[in-house]
Image (cartoon, rainbow, N blue to C red):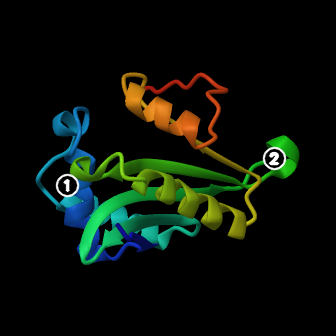
Amino acid sequence: MTVRFRPAHRDDIPAVAALLADDILGRTREGADMAPYLAAFDAMQAQGGNMLVVGLSDDRIVACYQIVFIPGLSATASLRAQIEGVRVASDLRGRGIGARLIADAEDRARAAGCGLMQLTTNRTRVDAHRFYDRTGFTPSHIGYKKPL
């Protein structure tokens, strides 16, 4: 299966929201109202260094991720790439699309001058943990979140 990756367009947002809802956690936290998703996309577009990327097979959006470039002082002022919202359509998992998605994110991070790519993943996503291990990520930190 051929998948090509490109920056998302505003009209891609309903398909991306469907991908985000297409798992056990997403079913309980994603909604049907597109207004918040469209507002978030517009804010991402307005902010430099924040991009939503979609993967297409033919005309179908089959994968997505968000990449944010974060300047910082630690690690000798290394630029970091944070990836979020990594999803592959549930009916297409296990076909190598995820590995191509990570490779695309790495290419974009290197092209931006990043020295590190990082992500967080929910503790309950054990399949995702195995996937990230296979793609070269190391579970090096403990993450914390606090609802506001």
Q: Measured from the top left, where is residue 113 in percent x and y?
A: 75, 64
Is residue 2 rendered to the left or right of residue 75? left
- In the picture of the structure, the residue carrying the numbered disc 1 is 18
Which numbered disc flags the more N-terminal residue, 1 or 2?
1
Where's the C terminus, which quadrant? top left
| Helix, strand or loop for disc 2 | loop
The residue positioned 42% from the left and 35% from the top of the image is 128
Q: CA distance from mark 1 to mark 2?
A: 37 Å
| Helix, strand or loop for disc 1 | helix
Q: Residue furthest left?
A: 32
Q: Foreground: 117 or 57?
A: 57
- In the picture of the structure, the residue carrying the numbered disc 2 is 73
The residue positioned 47% from the left and 72% from the top of the image is 46
Give neighbour class at mark 1: few <14, some 14-19, many 20+ (Cα, 10 Å).
some
Label 1 close to label 2 by CB (< 8 Å) = no
Q: Quadrant of residue 107?
A: bottom right
Do we see residue 110 in this rendering?
yes
The residue positioned 52% from the left and 63% from the top of the image is 50
Q: Foreground: 143 or 25?
A: 25
Disc 2 marks a residue whose amino acid type is Leu
Disc 1 marks a residue whose amino acid type is Ala
